[in-house]
Image (cartoon, helix red, strand yellow):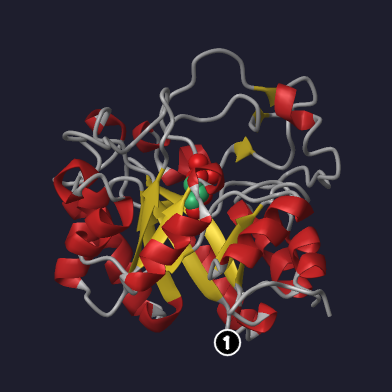
Amino acid sequence: VPLLMTSIPAAAIDLQSHRGGRALWPENTLPAFERSLDLGVDTLELDTGVTKDGVLIIAHDRHIDANLTRRKGQWVEGVQPTWHSLTLAEVQTLDVGRIRPDTPYAKRFARQMPMDGTSVPTLAALFDLVKKRGNNNIRFNIETKIDPTNPGDSVDPETFATLLVGQVREAGLADRVTIQSFDWRTLQVVRRIAPEIATAYLTIIDPEESNVSMTGESKWTAGFDPGRHGGSLPAAIKAAGGSIWSPYHLNLTPELVKEAHGLGLKVIPWTVNDAADMKRLIGWGVDGLITDDPVTGRQVLGR
Ligand code: G3P
Ligand code: CA
């Protein structure tokens, strides 16, 4: 049993397999989710989008990712269409079973097992798989990939949240699902139409990519900007009605974990891949870890 300086027992820490554990298996695919289930994670983290014909699919980027996608055995090249401009039938002609070997991040995922012939799954297919396998305790952390700065690349927040909530309820999974988003508008819709479903507020503070304005307004945060709350992100999330904060892990400090816990929020950072980072965050008392590498996560947690 590892020595962890934390008030939260290692057994209670929510180990989340990011995109199904993409350091080990092709991201956001059914084979990856199955192996994460075999391994014994607590939660499957996944990204969703909506096709032209209104089907929820599991995919990360708004556009088809040329680093992950082949058509008839050939890597797709150049600027690609959005998933939202394709029908499900069109989406499912593509193969996302491996990482393009000449991308910069292929090296980082050298342990990944290629699974050729794997297509983009629907959310319904994942729910069916889990039901069939009888994984009755697994949880799902489902992200809505929607970007207020590119509204044409997706459905609107109301439509997205309504579709997702409907599918979660239909599968009888409302008590095992968290809906997460950088776009807090979606989370506000979920809170209104499905208060029984947990919501997680994603943040990144980065000069290039931030979805949070620490001093003023942000298009992403539905008016709950930290600037209105003395520059405090946890206070902004609390004011939005959130119960889970998922920050980029390098934005976190022990003081922020303490502040969030003082407000009654859980803190579940992403995407933590090195054992040393995991141990440091566990020592600060985080409630969960979202990781590309759930094998390392399990080792650190002594499972
Ligand atoms: O759970 C949060 C994390 O998944 C956000 O980052 O870009 O990998 O979806 P991303
Ligand atoms: Ca995600």
Q: Residue 271: in sight, yes or no? A: yes
Question: Circle 1 — which element?
Answer: loop
Q: Which quarter of the rendered picture does the C terminus lie within?
A: bottom right
Name the residue beneath numbered marker 1. 136
In the rendered view, tell whether residue 279 sits above or below residue 89.
Answer: below
Q: Residue at x 36, y 37 (%)?
A: 84
Q: What residue do we see at 30% from left, 36% from top? A: 147
Q: Position of residue 258 (x, y in %)?
A: 44, 65
Q: Position of residue 124 (x, y in %)?
A: 46, 65
In the rendered image, the quadrant that contains the N terminus is bottom right
Give the answer, above or below, for where 144 lies relative to 14: above
**Which of 225 and 3 lies nearest the eye of the viewer?**
3
Q: Is residue 157 left or right of residue 254?
A: left
Query: Which three-letter amino acid code belongs to the residue tagged 1?
Result: Asn
- In the image, 16 versus 173, the foreground residue is 16
Residue 217 position within the rendered picture, expressed as x and y whole percent measured from the top left: 16, 35
The picture places residue 67, in percent across and down from the top left corner, at: 65, 26
Q: Does residue 122 show up? A: no
Rendered view: 204 above or below 31: above
Q: Is residue 96 left or right of residue 265?
A: right
Q: Residue at x 23, y 32 (%)?
A: 151
Would you call the spot at circle 1 few (<14 residues within 10 Å), some (14-19), or many (20 or more)? few
Residue 263 location, quadrant: bottom left
Q: Nearer the viewer, residue 143 or 68?
A: 143
- Quadrant of the image occupied by residue 83: top left
